[in-house]
Image (cartoon, coloured by chain):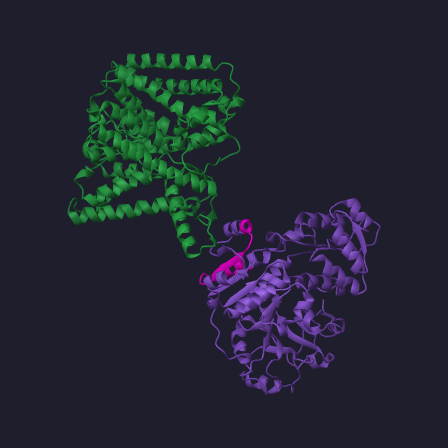
């Protein structure tokens, strides 16, 4: 492990995150609210940390950036970002403890959207804006952001991109990694601009439009309103957000190809087809259940609530327009399943990703065929193209690790005194970067009641989920630190 | 004619042998010492040892500006070598260059041949796979040769014991089935084959070579063999080489309802083709493993194709498949001696992948000015040739019977514009007609001369 290069890269990433704290300060200055000083303090702390790391890594050789270094950098970068990003919440007194602040920041950067704020609207706009901005920064990835703005990260950047990008199969869109990062951020910014415009047209204030857009395109879920998007009671706003959540949950590489003139890019992609199919199927099921149980009257209302909630949970955004704990049990279970599936590889969404579900399903099919033809050879295919065996194995292992993480975290939370429903759904929601679970962490409640230690467990789960387990677990391997 | 053949492997050797026996001056370029020695011992040709893609080696073989070489045939098993050899030869002023292309994308269309400035790129494996596919689709056919760019074909059918047409003269058959566009060009009978005339009568066991259109072959088949054949539902392919792969690939595209199973002994090869193929069930196992064949449903298989690299294995496994209940066995056989044994073996059809390559080469050697395809039917000593009647030629405006074609030459098919038909004696030929000529090998030059086909 070349520690110097790790420190130097971390220093740069921390600097990028710190610099972005200037943006919420603009609101603080505009509103003349007392959260200006906390931001200045956080800015100072971030700068100090960055400087410290820079000194530690001053004679780093960028060519030392290997897979081990990259994985370590990415994990630690997210921890540093959350550590620095938590400071405004803590210093301003928006949350009582640093644990809560860290949880909130981690939830923001990992685009989970699980909150410990009890009365959201009581906070100054600067704090709320920072909260939503963490989503936006984390959505496309802190590293991708750093790669896009800092050309000196280019060497070894491919390793960094691979370690952070979601999905089992990594591809570069262009020969140069910085260009790829710029393209991804370009599409991300484009979505942000278009959605903000659409929400402004729907009568939202600039602040509301921007913060909700951040929550949407990053598939985050923080809303500056106590009752999330449901508070507007506006079908237009809900449909706009539904559409953009759906787009953000699909692969940005596909969007890029589509924008480059390949009109059938989405439809030809097997993962997108599965994603669209699950969305339509689950929406139909939930709509049907809502109508049958009388929880909603009128098809248009039922369809709107169902589509919003299905897309919100599947893309792991976590916005709410209705208290789905009052809905029929079957719909709650459908939503719980969707939390595990998540968005597509290469999207801002979390969860296990559709491509992994598809791969595991195909592998199961191959295994069944092998029982029928003991001598047969059945490569796992997705969309007709065979998938490397190493990818399939890694995906199967990912499934196992995901389930183990889920089980151990739930065990820990129940051990800390949480009830089974809240503990399991809370873990599923944090591991999948969704946000709201059921029970005491349901859509109308929040995570403030979770025991102190439990918040650290859930923060860790969020990081595991966002960096897809392997990246995070690597730093716990002894072998990674040798050599 | 001075000919240079690059590569004396399984394709190059028979080509060189055939050309030498026809009296051409052949130089063989071969890198492998054993093969080179074998060529020197067995054939009356010159041998140059070395890599056929190197200019110095080719120069020694007579491929250089100023040295008069008429034809270069590159048939090594490496496309890069073949293409490069053709390229060098073309620059050295060789009039005709032909190459073997194993990668199928080169022969999907003739665009690559044109782009590479090669007169002909040939894939023997593709031709063999095409013939096997046709043999599987036309269940009772023993041989098929595609003609008129796939609209029609030459089929060989064996007359069954209970065939309705036996004991009836050809003239009678012609009037009985006047709606059928088909012409019987040759009858192969034990003790001597012949070109049938109006009073010829077919006997059970005769192998009839019939030219007909694709859409009429289903009906024609029932005349030779009235037994009901199951449509193609399951095909077992033994051997996952280029031909086996191509057969499976073509059948996959042909219909979703065909259940294809491919067996190969080499596990790594199985891994690779399983990834390349789609629906085909690829099995890593031995084609001679009786239990495996039975388990994988050889009994219900309508087609059983053996495509390994060994003629002997293909024949034996084919016989095994038949004995286990496969309806039709097709074997890939490369040696002519084995081809001639078909009457003694319980194999329904044999396909020789070298025939296609040899046919094209012979066409260029024998009829360098002809534009159409030549098909050599070695087993009966006959040839089939496609060509165009020139506008100002002797045959244009002439009725078929007035041209004075000697007995043994048959005008099998005429394509005029978009229509195609079997000509009668009183059919008047026109300039621009595409014709299919069938004749014994010796008479083909005479036929081409009389009709002046290009």
The chain that appears green in the image is A
Magenta extent: B247-269
Whole-percent x and y of residue A338? 29, 41
**Quarter of the figure with the C terminus of chain B:** bottom right
In the depicted structure, whether residue B364 falls above or below residue A47: below
Whole-percent x and y of residue B438? 68, 73
The residue lying toward the viewer, choosing from B324 and A166, is B324
Question: Hey, which quadrant is residue A394 in on the image?
Answer: top left
The residue lying toward the viewer, choosing from B308 and B150, is B308
Question: Hey, which quadrant is residue A354 in on the image?
Answer: top left
Residue at figure coordinates x 51%, y 61% from the top left: B251
In the visual, does A49 lie left or right of A176? left
| Colour of the chain lettered B | purple
In the depicted structure, whether residue A271 falls above or below residue A425: below
> What residue occupies the far left of the structure in this picture?
A294
In the visual, does B291 lie left or right of B343? left
């Amino acid at each position: 492990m070349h520690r110097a290069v790790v420190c130097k890269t971390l220093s740069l990433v921390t600097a990028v995150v710190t610099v972005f704290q200037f943006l919420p300060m603009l609101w603080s200055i505009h509103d003349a609210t007392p959260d200006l000083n906390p931001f200045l303090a956080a800015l100072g702390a971030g700068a100090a940390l960055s400087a410290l790391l820079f000194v530690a890594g001053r004679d780093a050789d960028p060519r030392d950036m290997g897979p081990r270094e990259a994985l370590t950098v990415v994990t630690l970068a997210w921890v540093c970002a959350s550590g620095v990003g938590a400071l405004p919440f803590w210093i301003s007194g928006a949350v009582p403890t640093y644990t809560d602040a860290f949880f909130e920041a981690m939830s923001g950067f990992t685009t989970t959207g699980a909150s410990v704020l009890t009365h959201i609207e009581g906070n100054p706009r600067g704090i709320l804006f920072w909260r939503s901005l963490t989503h936006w920064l984390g959505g496309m990835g802190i590293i991708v952001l750093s790669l896009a703005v800092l050309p000196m990260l280019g060497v070894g950047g491919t390793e960094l991109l691979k370690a952070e990008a979601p999905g089992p199969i990594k591809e570069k869109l262009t020969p140069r990694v910085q260009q790829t990062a710029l393209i991804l951020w370009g599409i991300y910014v484009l979505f942000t601009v278009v959605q903000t415009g659409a929400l402004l047209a729907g009568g939202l204030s600039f602040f509301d439009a921007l913060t909700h857009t951040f929550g949407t395109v990053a598939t985050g879920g923080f809303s500056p309103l106590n009752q999330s998007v449901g508070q507007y009671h506006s079908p237009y706003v809900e449909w706009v957000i539904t559409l953009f959540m759906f787009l953000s949950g699909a692969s940005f590489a596909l969007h890029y190809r589509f924008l480059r003139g390949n009109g059938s890019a989405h439809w030809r992609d097997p993962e997108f087809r599965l994603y669209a199919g699950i969305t339509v199927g689950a929406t139909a099921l939930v709509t049907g259940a809502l109508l049958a149980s009388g929880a909603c009257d009128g098809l248009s209302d039922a369809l709107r609530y169902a589509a919003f909630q299905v897309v919100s949970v599947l893309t792991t955004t976590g916005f709410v327009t209705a208290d789905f704990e009052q809905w029929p049990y079957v719909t709650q279970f459908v939503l719980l399943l969707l939390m595990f599936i998540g968005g597509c590889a290469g999207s801002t969404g979390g969860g296990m990703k559709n491509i992994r579900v598809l791969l595991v399903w195909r592998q199961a099919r191959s295994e069944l065929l092998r029982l029928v033809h003991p001598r047969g050879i059945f490569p796992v295919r997705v969309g007709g193209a065979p998938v490397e065996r190493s990818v399939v194995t890694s995906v199967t292992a990912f499934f196992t690790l995901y389930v183990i993480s889920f089980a151990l975290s739930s065990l820990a939370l129940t051990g800390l005194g949480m009830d089974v429903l809240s503990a399991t759904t809370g873990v599923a929601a944090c591991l999948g970067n969704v946000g709201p679970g059921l029970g005491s962490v349901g859509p109308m409640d929040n995570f403030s009641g979770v025991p102190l230690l439990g918040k650290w467990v859930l923060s860790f789960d969020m990081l595991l989920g966002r960096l897809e387990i392997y990246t995070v677990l690597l730093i716990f391997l002894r072998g990674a630190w040798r050599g | 004619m001075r000919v240079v053949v690059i590569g004396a492997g399984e394709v190059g050797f028979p080509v060189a042998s055939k050309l030498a026996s026809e009296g051409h001056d052949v130089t063989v370029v071969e890198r492998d010492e054993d093969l080179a020695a074998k060529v020197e011992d067995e054939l009356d040709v010159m041998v140059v040892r070395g890599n056929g893609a190197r200019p110095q080696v080719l120069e020694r073989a007579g491929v250089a500006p100023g040295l008069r070489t008429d034809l270069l045939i590159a048939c090594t098993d490496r496309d890069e070598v073949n293409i490069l050899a053709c390229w060098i030869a073309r620059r050295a002023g060789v009039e005709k260059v032909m190459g073997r292309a194993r990668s199928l994308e080169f022969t999907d269309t003739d665009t690559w041949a044109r782009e590479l400035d090669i007169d002909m790129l040939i894939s023997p494996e593709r031709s063999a796979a095409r013939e096997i596919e046709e043999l599987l689709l036309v269940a009772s056919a023993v041989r098929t040769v595609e003609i008129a760019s796939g609209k029609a074909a030459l089929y060989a059918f064996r007359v069954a014991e209970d065939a309705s047409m036996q004991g009836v003269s050809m003239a009678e058959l012609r009037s009985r089935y006047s709606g059928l566009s088909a012409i019987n060009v040759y009858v192969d009978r034990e003790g001597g084959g012949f070109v049938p005339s109006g009073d010829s009568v077919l006997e059970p066991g005769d192998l009839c070579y019939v030219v007909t259109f694709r859409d009429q072959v289903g009906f024609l088949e029932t005349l030779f063999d009235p037994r009901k054949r199951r449509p193609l539902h399951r095909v077992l392919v033994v051997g996952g080489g280029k031909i086996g792969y191509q057969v499976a690939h073509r059948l996959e595209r042909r219909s979703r309802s065909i259940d294809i199973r491919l067996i190969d002994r080499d596990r790594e090869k199985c891994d690779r083709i399983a990834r390349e193929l789609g629906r085909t069930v690829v099995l890593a196992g031995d084609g001679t493993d009786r239990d495996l064949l039975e388990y994988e449903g050889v009994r219900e298989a309508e087609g059983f194709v053996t495509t390994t690299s060994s003629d002997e294995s293909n024949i034996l496994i084919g016989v095994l498949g038949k004995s286990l209940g496969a309806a039709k066995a097709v074997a890939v056989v490369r040696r002519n001696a084995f081809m001639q044994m078909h009457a003694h073996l319980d194999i329904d059809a044999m396909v020789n992948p070298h025939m296609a390559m040899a046919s094209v080469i012979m066409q260029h050697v024998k009829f360098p000015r002809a534009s159409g395809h030549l098909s050599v039917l070695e087993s009966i000593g006959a040839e089939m040739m496609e060509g165009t009647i020139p506008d100002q030629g002797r045959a244009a405006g002439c009725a078929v019977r007035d041209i004075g074609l000697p007995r043994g030459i048959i005008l099998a098919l005429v394509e005029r514009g978009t229509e195609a038909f079997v000509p009668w004696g009183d059919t008047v030929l026109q300039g621009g007609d595409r014709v299919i000529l069938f004749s014994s090998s010796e008479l083909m030059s005479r036929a081409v001369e009389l009709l002046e086909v290009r």
